[in-house]
Image (tube, grey):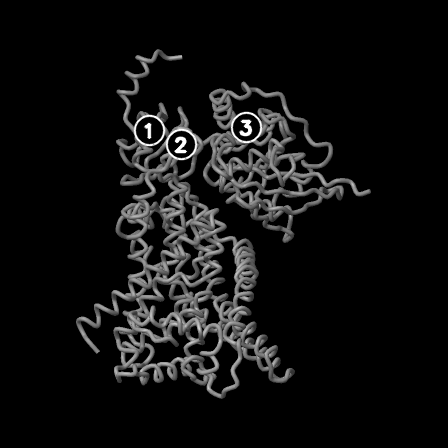
Amino acid sequence: MSHPAARELETDSLQSLSQAQVGCDFQIKFVEGPACDQLRNLGFCESLQVRKLADGRNLICSVCGTRVALSDDLAKQVKVSPVAA
Amino acid sequence: MDEPIEMVALAGNPNAGKTTLFNALTGSAAKVGNYAGVTVEVKRGHTHTPNGKKLEVVDLPGCYSLEGGSPDQELSRNVLIGTHEKVSKPDLVICVLDASNLERHLQLALEIIELNIPVVVALNMVDVAEKAGLRLDAVKLSEELGVPVVPLRADRGKGIVELKQAIRHPFPSPPDLSWEKGNEESRRAFGLATSELSARRPSAHTSTVSDKLDRVLLHPVLGWVFFIGIMFVLFWSIFSFSGVPMGWIESLQEFLVGQVEGAMGEGDLRDLITRGMIEGVGAVVIFLPQILMLFFFIGLLESSGYMARAAFLMDGLMAKVGLSGKAFLPLLSSYACAIPGIMATRTIDSAKERLVTIFVAPWMSCSARLPVYLLLVPMLLGGSEGGSLQALVFLGIYVVGTLTAFAVAKILRGRLGPDEVESHFLLELPPYRLPQWGYIFRHVLERGWAFLRKAGTVILAIMILLWAATTYPKLDSDDPAEVLAHTVVGRISHLIEPIVKPMGFDGRTGTAILTSFAAREVFVGSMAQLFQIEEADDEGETRSRIRQRMAAEKWPDGRPMFSPAAVISLLIFYIYALQCLPTTAVVAREAGSWKWAIGQFVFMTAFAAVASLVVYQLANLFSPG
C-alpha cells in the first residue's frame, strides 16, 4: 500500500476529469470524494481508461464502452492521468 | 398435492436488457405488481424448462450494487437474502450482464455470487459487444466465475433455449470464491481482471454511430434545434392524430346512451345510467387516445435512447429552478396528463426534488383543460374558433402555467432545504437503438389499461355521487334551472355565490366550477345544463351555443356577465386549480402521504381563487364594465 504522503504528492500531480482535455484518453488514478461509490458503480474505477467527449456544466465521458453524463462537481472527484498515445 | 413452483429471480444493472429477457422467457404472461410503500415495481411471470418444469420468474428492479440505500437496491437485496415480506427467497438467480460493459456489470454479479445462491449468468447483447470490437470468451468467463455463462441476444430470442437448458435441475451449486468475500477492493480487482480476460477491448477508441449522432443531438446549438423540433412534432401529433379515435369514443358513448334510452322508460335509473355513468365516465375515457399516444411517443423516445439526451440538455435550464434534468420527463408527460407524469417522477434520485416535481406537475396544462380553453378563448376573440390569434392565446396559457410551476418549484425547493445525501447529475447515455416495437406497444396497452382501471373506477364513483347531488331533492317544475337550484348542488351554489362573485362569476358559473372539481372537463357540460342550452350533435356547435348564451347574459344592473375580465378570470382559475381527483389519489400514493396530496389540493385551489380574484379586480380597475 502506498504511503499517504506519497499518494498526496501523486494526487497533486494529477488532473481531475473536470480539467482534462476533450477528445483525449485518460487513465483513472483515484476516485475520491462523497460520491465515489456512485461513480465506481457506473464504471469509474481505478486503472480503467476514460475518454472525455464533451465539456460544460455536465461532461460526457466514455468509460467501459458506455457514455456517461456527469456533473462538473462529480468530475472533480475523478483524478486522471493522460494515456500515452 | 401440487409440487411448489420454484422461483428464479432476474437481477442486473439498469439497461442490461432484463425486461427484454423477462418478456422472452415469460411471453405475454407478465404481470406488474405494485407493493405499497415501495416506489419500484417487481414483474412476475412463468416459464418452462426444456423438460417441462414450470418456474416462476421474478424481475427485480435494476440496480448497480446491493450495498446502497435506495428503494430499488433495498428491494433487490431483501429478495435475494430472503427477507422480503411478499417475495420469497429465489431458488436460482439469473444475473443479466451487458456483454459490452462487463467491467461494470460484473461487480453486481460478484456481489450476488457471494450470497451463496445458485447463479446462472446471462451474457446479453453479445452483438453490441462484438460490433464494438470486444473479443468475448464466455467459456473463460464461466471458468473464472465458477458458474454457467450463456451468451444471448434477448431482443431476438437467441440463446433463450440454451438459457432454459442452464436453469434445468439440478441447479448449479454456488462456487468457491476466487476473491475475498465481503472485501470490496478484492471483489473489484477480481472483476476487472476477469473482464480483461474474457472481454478484451480494442486498444484504440473507435467512434460509434451513437458518438456521431451525439455530436449533433447534444451540440450546444444544433442539439436545441433538434430538441425543439422533436417536442413540436410530439405535441402536434398528439393533438392532431388523436381527434379521430376521440370521435369514435364519442360515437360509442352516443350509441350506448341511445341503446339505454331505447330499452328503458324515463326515470331516475335511466338518467343515472346515461347522464351519470355513461356520459360521466365517457368524459374521462375520451382522453384515452391522447394518453396512449403520449405513452407511445415517450416509449419511442426512451427506447431509442433520446430521452436521456433530452434530460441532459434540459439539466441547465431546470437547475435554475432547483430541479435537475431528470424532472424534465415527468413535467413533459404532465402536459398530456398529470397522472403518468407524477408516476414518472420515480426516476428522480433526490427525494425532495421528487416531491417538488410532484407538487408542480399539475400546473403543466393537461389535455383535460382543453375543452374549457376551447369554450372560453374564442369569447375573448370575437366568438369564432381557430386562427393564429387563438393559437397564440393557447400558447400564452401554457406558458403562464409552466412559468408559475417553475416559480413555485424554485421557492419550494429553497424552503425544503438541501438533501441529506447530496445528489449530483449522473446519467448513463445508452447507445441509440432501433425502437423495440413489441415492448412499446405492450407498455402502451399496460398503461392504457391502468388509466382505465384506476381513473375510470374513481370517476365512476364520483359521477354517481355528482349525479345524485344534481338530481335530489327533486322539484316538480319544468324549468331545469329551478330544478337544479333545488338540488344539493344548487343549494351549495347559492351558498357559494357571495364567495365567487368578487371573482366575476354568478351562482350558476360557481356551480359549474363546483361540479368540475372531480374532473375539470365536466365544466362545459355543466355550463350547457345550467344555462339551459340544448346540446347539438356537433361538439363545436354546442360550444358556440354556450358562448352565444354566455355573451347575452347580464347582471341585474344590466352589465354584461361574461365581460373580458370575467372570462380571463375564469381562464386563470382553470389554469391553476387542481380539479382532478384521480391526480390527488396518485399524488397521495407516490408522495406516500395524504397530507401532501391534500396540501397540494388546498394550495392550488386557493392559489387559483386568489389569482382569479386579483385578475378580475385589476382588470375592472383599468377597464371598468
Q: Amino acid at mark 3?
A: Glu
- On residue B111, the disc is 3
Percent across and percent down for residue B614 are 25, 65
The alpha-carbon separation of the residues under discs 2 and 1 comes to 9 Å
Amino acid carrying mark 1 in the image: Gln
Total number of numbered labels? 3
> In the drawing, does residue B175 fall left or right of residue B602?
right
Q: Chain of mark 1?
A: A
State the CA–CA distance, disc 3 to disc 1.
25 Å
Tell me the SS state at disc 1: loop
Rendered image quadrant of residue B227: bottom left
**Quadrant where the image shows the C terminus of chain B:** bottom left
Residue B306 x, y percent position in the rendering: 40, 50
**Cβ atoms under marks 2 and 1 closer than 8 Å:** yes
Look at the numbered discs 2 and 3 and tell me whether their residues touch, using CB distance below 8 Å: no
Circle 1 is placed at which residue position? A77
Which disc, if any, is residue A39? 2
